[in-house]
Image (cartoon, helix red, strand yellow):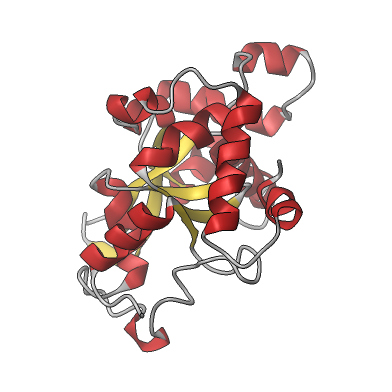
């Protein structure tokens, strides 16, 4: 059954636990495969799947971002703590930097988010002194990495504004630190589990809702 309205989409992700935006791996549920192509990019928040992803994050109904092993997708409130505890490093960022586990770009990006928040890619590039063609790819990779390990998350979207304060173009994702964005009650669910058990439950759920094997899903999620 194809998803046609925003509430149907929310119910579907809540039922699944997590869902890809597009093809994470053949056989795994994705928003692209469960909606009509012609319904995308109409700007209607009730029927346009492109708007649903940002709206769900802004309303804190679902988590969205590069949060499925670095791939774009959605995680429900009931499963968010499994992903957070299963993928967020236990060491502080400073410790990871000292151990050589993060790049200089990732470190600089994280420092930026400790000073500012609710930034889009354009804001980040400007603050870090790079352009799309010069240094932009490293910054884009760092934004993805900090989402993958649940430091940053998509918090909604906004349009760019010109010098007169007038909005233009398509809305762009804005990012926030997970600790600022995530509802406190989400992190209280599934408490008392260890990292391996949490990852195991994610794989159990993923295999149950798809037509893929456990090892294939583990590889896609980086487990």
Q: Nearer the viewer, residue 34 or 64?
A: 34
Residue occupying the far right of the picture: 100
| Location of residue 144 with respect to 168 vertically, above or below | above
Q: Is residue 138 above or below residue 51?
A: above
Residue at position x 54%, y 44% from top? 125
Q: Quadrant of residue 45?
A: bottom left
Residue at 20% of width from left, 70% of height from top? 46
Residue 140 visible within the image: yes
Near-viewer residue (202 or 96): 202
Quadrant placement of the N terminus? bottom left
Q: Is residue 95 left or right of residue 13?
A: right
Across and down, in percent, residue 134 comes to 68, 51
Question: Residue drawn at (71%, 18%), measured in percent from left and top?
Answer: 97
Percent position of residue 96, x then y: 70, 17
Q: Is residue 139 left or right of residue 10?
A: right
Left or right: where 9 falls relative to 204: left
State the image coordinates of residue 167 (x, y, percent, origin top left).
Answer: 24, 61
Q: Which residue is located at x 47 percent, y 74 percent?
A: 32
């Amino acid at each position: 059954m194809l998803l046609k309205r925003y509430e149907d989409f929310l119910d579907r992700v809540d039922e699944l636990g997590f869902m890809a935006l597009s093809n994470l791996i053949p056989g795994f549920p994705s928003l692209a495969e469960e909606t009509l192509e012609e319904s995308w990019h109409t700007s209607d928040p009730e029927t346009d799947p492109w708007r649903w992803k940002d709206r769900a994050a802004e309303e804190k109904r679902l988590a969205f971002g590069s949060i499925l092993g670095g791939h774009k997708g959605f995680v429900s409130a009931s499963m968010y703590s499994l992903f957070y505890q299963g993928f967020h490093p236990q060491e502080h960022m400073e410790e990871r930097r000292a151990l050589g586990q993060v790049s200089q770009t990732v470190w600089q990006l994280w420092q930026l988010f400790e000073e500012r928040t609710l930034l889009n890619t354009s804001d980040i590039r400007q603050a870090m002194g790079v352009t799309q063609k010069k240094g932009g790819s490293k910054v884009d990779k760092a934004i993805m990495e900090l989402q993958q390990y649940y430091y940053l998350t998509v918090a909604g979207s906004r349009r760019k504004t010109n010098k007169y304060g007038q909005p233009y173009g398509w809305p762009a994702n804005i990012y926030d630190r997970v600790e600022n964005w995530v509802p406190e009650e989400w992190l209280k669910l599934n408490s008392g589990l260890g990292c391996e058990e949490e990852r195991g439950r994610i794989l159990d759920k993923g295999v149950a809702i798809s037509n893929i094997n456990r090892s294939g899903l583990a590889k896609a999620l980086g487990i």
